[in-house]
Image (cartoon, rainbow, N blue to C red):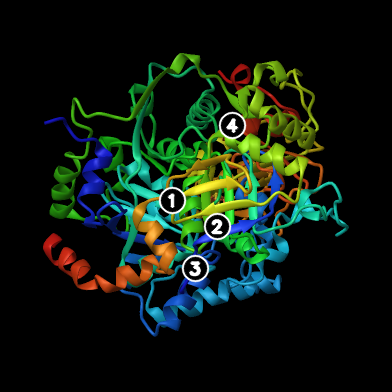
Amino acid sequence: MAGKTLFDKVWDAHVVEEIPGGPSVLYIDKHLVHEVTSPQAFAGIDARGMKVFRPENTVATPDHNVPTVDQHLTIHDELSRFQVNKLTENCENHGVPLYGLNHPYQGIVHVIGPELGITQPGMTIVCGDSHTSTHGAFGSVAFGIGTSEVEMVLTTQCILQPKPKKMRINVEGELRKGVTAKDIILYIISKISASGGTGYFIEYAGSAIRGLSMEGRMTICNMSIESGARGGLIAPDATTYEYIRGREFAPKGKEFDEAVSRWEQLKTDEGAVFDREITYDAADISPMITYGTNPGMGAKIEARIPTEADIEASGQNSFRKSLKYMGFEAGIPLEGIPVDFVFVGSCTNGRIEDLRTFASFVKGKKKADHVTAWIVPGSKQVEKQAIEEGIDRALKESGFELRQPGCSACLAMNDDKIPEGKLAVSTSNRNFEGRQGPGARTMLASPLTAAAVAVTGKVTDPSALIN
Amino acid sequence: MAIEKVNTIVSTAVPLSIENVDTDQIIPARFLKATTREGFGENLFRDWRYDKAGATREDFVLNQDAYSGTILVAGKNFGSGSSREHAAWAIYDYGFRVVVSSFFADIFKNNSLNNGLLPVQVSEEFLQKLFTTIEGDPSTEILVSLPDQVIRISGTDIEESFEINPYKKECLLNGYTDIDYLISIKDKIEAYEMHRN
Ligand code: SF4
């Protein structure tokens, strides 16, 4: 018999029932909930007069809508306040654990799940949020769902899902100087395109992936959705177990050891078959940045923006529209493009390692005068740790300030909007038109690149500036 | 929530020949603050329909009188990005019942099906033919038959069949939802939980 993939092992263990000719009924171990995609689901369950089926397997936090300054005050935007309060009310009614604003565990759902040890290998995890794929870094099957599905999980702890196809992407060899996890994933998406992963679940493997920290692996899995994939995952190993050990909701003592021996089974068997497999050479990856309005439009910073001749015919309309929006001419060099804003944060790069990278680069240097920088920790715990490590002070000396946790300018639902026409280099995950505010222009890059840009005030390849 | 039954739709169509239309374009994040499902149609494609002063952008298809109908025909990779179901709600609330494209993002497709909005995936050639035909004559009617799984340019034999999961087809034809099904098998779910522990 052919071996099984890691994905198959986790998926198959959670199938309650297969509907002939239809989707599987998939059991969900952990359901993460936030304020934006849940109110209509709670309204649905209330209308049926039912209660949340397994509140103990559910956890909620407000993140999308929260301000990143003065969090101790009431939210001044009326609609945002209403939505955040609605979440509190719904959680209280249904006994769902909530880490509300000002709670020491509040933060972006995909940052707090791992840091609290809620996310563990072999689990199925969903959230009404496409970047749920982040949790796949631990060898779990984690993916985003819509609000109707949120209602299903609240009501039955299950959803109906067709089983996706399987892809494996291997990155082999050693990464070059200045190349980080973010560059790996931007490189992959630039190769397979913003729709190349659609219909698939991706397993990331190879020595360059194995060599990454958990934070780096989360960055990779996080952006699986930007290739269109439902999710991504990485087999757990010693790095994973060490990260989980001792965290709030992680198994303790003997239970932890037992868990590790179970988790060790979670790898793709030799001979298991993927529907698609691609291998990249780590040495071919350079620091990357996007120049267009979908995450597949990425290039090496040292390169030029492509010209129409480089784009296939059916995509030329979108390419032109995209460059027009960005205000860029085809064929110009990326390095040197003047930048107005720098945003460091989000569930892609708002973890402690990202803040450390940024802070250690800007140390002893000064922020470029014309650049406005927003440095936003992914959670209360990240904020606390950054303060304990003196990152906030180091930032201040270089002219930066640390804000309070939330999704912030990643989707600009709160006040953190990049003004119309301004160009931002952002460590988040989407460069869509208006994503960071109406008319805002976004270039996606790593925290290291963001640091280099914040100091020089223009698109800069960081690798030449580090030792 | 019950959904409206879907069967055969005959309508003129609106051609949106742009690729990679993401859910942030369909409904920008700043309009996601509502806590009900209604009213999102007003802000469908908000920043393409209106400029920042709120004035109508005449060059956008939804603002052109020539085009109307309950079928939206869109470029490849429609609905990518965020999982926000508000995108499907907005399209439905605006009045569309079918979206045709040569490629749909996964979550958007699920969300549409869960709300009685039919995603019809066709070949790139057929899609281009639809665009030229509709743009050439906006009064062209398109027929979409869910029972036969066929999309046709009315009055011609230009047609293509489309795929849909048999379970989902049943649901749409009868107005059933996944959640009703899941609630009906709750004892099985509990048995699964018991068996695992
Ligand atoms: S940080 Fe951005 S991508 Fe992540 S959950 Fe928040 S809004 Fe979504």
At x 39%, y 57%, the residue is B168
Give the quadrant of residue A332.
Answer: top right
Which residue extends farthest bottom? A49
The chain letter for the residue carrying disc 3 is A
Which three-letter amino acid code belongs to the residue tagged 4? Glu
Please state the horizontal and vertical placement of residue B122, each as a whole percent of the image: 53, 40
Give the residue number, with chain letter if any, for mark 4. B125
The answer to whether tags 3 and 2 share a subunit is no
Relative vertical location of residue A311 with respect to residue A194 in this rendering, above or below: above
Which three-letter amino acid code belongs to the residue tagged 2? Arg
The chain letter for the residue carrying disc 2 is B
Give the residue number, with chain letter if any, for mark 1. A132
In three-dimensional space, the C-alpha distance between marks 4 and 2, rounded to whole angstroms, equals 30 Å
Secondary element at image label 1 = helix
Is the N terminus of chain A in the top left, top right, bottom left or bottom right quadrant? Answer: top left
Please state the horizontal and vertical placement of residue A27, each as a whole percent of the image: 27, 59
Depth check: A251 or A362 in front?
Answer: A251
The chain letter for the residue carrying disc 1 is A
- Relative placement, left or right, of A176 versus B143 is left
Give the residue number, with chain letter if any, for mark 2. B84
In three-dimensional space, the C-alpha distance between marks 1 and 3, rounded to whole angstroms, equals 15 Å
Which dot, 3 or 2, sits closer to the camera?
A: 2
Depth check: B103 or A359 in front?
Answer: B103
Give the residue number, with chain letter if any, for mark 3. A38
Which dot, 4 or 3, sits closer to the camera?
A: 4
